[in-house]
């Protein structure tokens, strides 16, 4: 029997211990013990929330399933397949009933071919969905509290970086010595009214600057930069603004 592995981890679930390596080890062990062949081409791994079905590797799995590339999909746990109960049931039904492909959680004793097994799987799916809702609420509350304190939310805008504080443990946000002056000059050039987003991109690239991902600047890069309230000392959250307690303007 040919098997595929679906492995998922998300940033807000890292504390759960669902590391990709641990998931894959358990899946390999199960496949070996049950006489299944796990082809490296059919290991679908991604780092994304399970609340949505719009996951690149998950969609790749479904496409290959349509071509009957494998006979079973192995998961470490039901929550890895989906955190949304409606998606979990819909896609499992599609794989099992329409395509004849098994969906197996290697760490849970579930036999979906029996009434009691289907009940057990339904309970697990219900818990997975509820946990996701609770986690989302906790994260939202954390963001709200951080915003109230004037903390920066999300990724650092270009021009900032982290450095260790004097205690050697905590990190603080400081202007990047190379990119902060460039951002500052970009604002000054744009304020003259003579530079467009495209002009700024050409200028930055000609100076050898690159984005935080190491890519050349484009007009969209500067549109995002020039409209980011962080550079004016504001924190945005759900389209609201609040003065920051600490001045993070590049200098």
Image (cartoon, grey):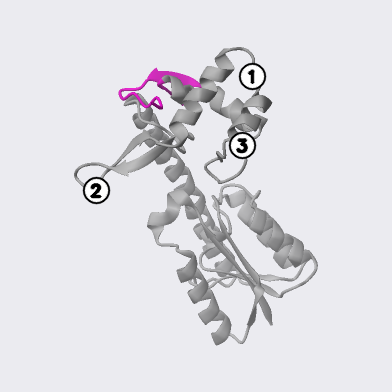
Compared with residue 107, is residue 12 higher up or lower down, i.e. above or below? above
Upstream in sequence: badge 1 or badge 2: 2
For the C terminus, the image quarter is top left
Mark 1: give few (<14), some (14-19) or many (20+) Cα within 10 Å. Answer: some
Considering every residue shown, the one lying at the far right of the view is 67
Q: Which residue is mark 2?
A: 169
Does 164 sit left or right of 249 as displayed? left
Residue 28 belongs to the span the image colors magenta: no
Residue 227 appears in the rendering? no
**Residue shown at 34%/25% (left/top)?**
148
Residue 248 belongs to the span the image colors magenta: yes
Q: Which residue is mark 1?
A: 195
Report how far apart the C-alphas of labels 3 and 1 lie in the structure.
14 Å
Say what secondary structure mark 3 lies in. helix
For the N terminus, the image quarter is bottom right
Residue 83 appears in the rendering? yes
Residue 94 figure quarter: bottom right
**Residue shown at 60%/44% (left/top)?**
215
Q: Which residue is mark 3?
A: 205
Q: Which residues are magenta?
A: 233-251
> Could you tell me if the residues under marks 2 and 3 are in contact, i.e. CB atoms within 8 Å?
no
Residue mark closest to the camera, 1 vs 2: 1
Upstream in sequence: badge 3 or badge 1: 1
Judging depth in this view, the residue of 181 and 158 nearest the camera is 181
């Amino acid at each position: 029997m040919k098997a595929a592995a679906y492995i998922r981890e998300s940033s807000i679930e890292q504390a759960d211990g669902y590391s990709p390596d641990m998931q894959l080890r358990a899946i390999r062990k199960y496949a070996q013990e049950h006489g299944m062949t796990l082809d490296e081409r059919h290991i679908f791994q991604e780092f994304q929330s399970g609340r949505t079905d719009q996951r690149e590797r998950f969609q790749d799995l479904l496409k290959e399933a349509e071509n009957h590339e494998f006979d079973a999909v192995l998961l470490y746990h039901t929550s890895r397949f989906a955190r949304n109960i409606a998606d979990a049931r819909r896609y499992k039904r599609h794989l099992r009933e329409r395509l004849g492909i098994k969906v197996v959680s290697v760490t849970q004793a579930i036999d979906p071919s029996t009434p009691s097994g289907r009940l057990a799987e339904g309970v697990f799916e219900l818990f997975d969905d509820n946990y996701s809702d609770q986690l989302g609420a906790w994260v939202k509350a954390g963001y709200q509290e951080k915003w109230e304190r004037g903390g920066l939310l999300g990724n650092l805008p270009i021009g900032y970086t982290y450095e260790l504080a004097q205690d050697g443990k905590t990190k603080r946000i400081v202007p990047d010595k190379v990119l902060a002056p460039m951002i500052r000059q970009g604002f000054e050039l744009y304020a003259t009214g003579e530079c467009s987003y495209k002009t700024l991109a050409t200028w930055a690239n000609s100076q050898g600057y690159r984005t935080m991902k190491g890519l050349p600047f484009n007009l969209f890069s500067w549109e995002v930069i020039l409209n980011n309230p962080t550079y004016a000392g504001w924190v945005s959250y759900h389209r609201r603004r609040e003065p920051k307690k600490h001045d993070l303007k590049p200098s």
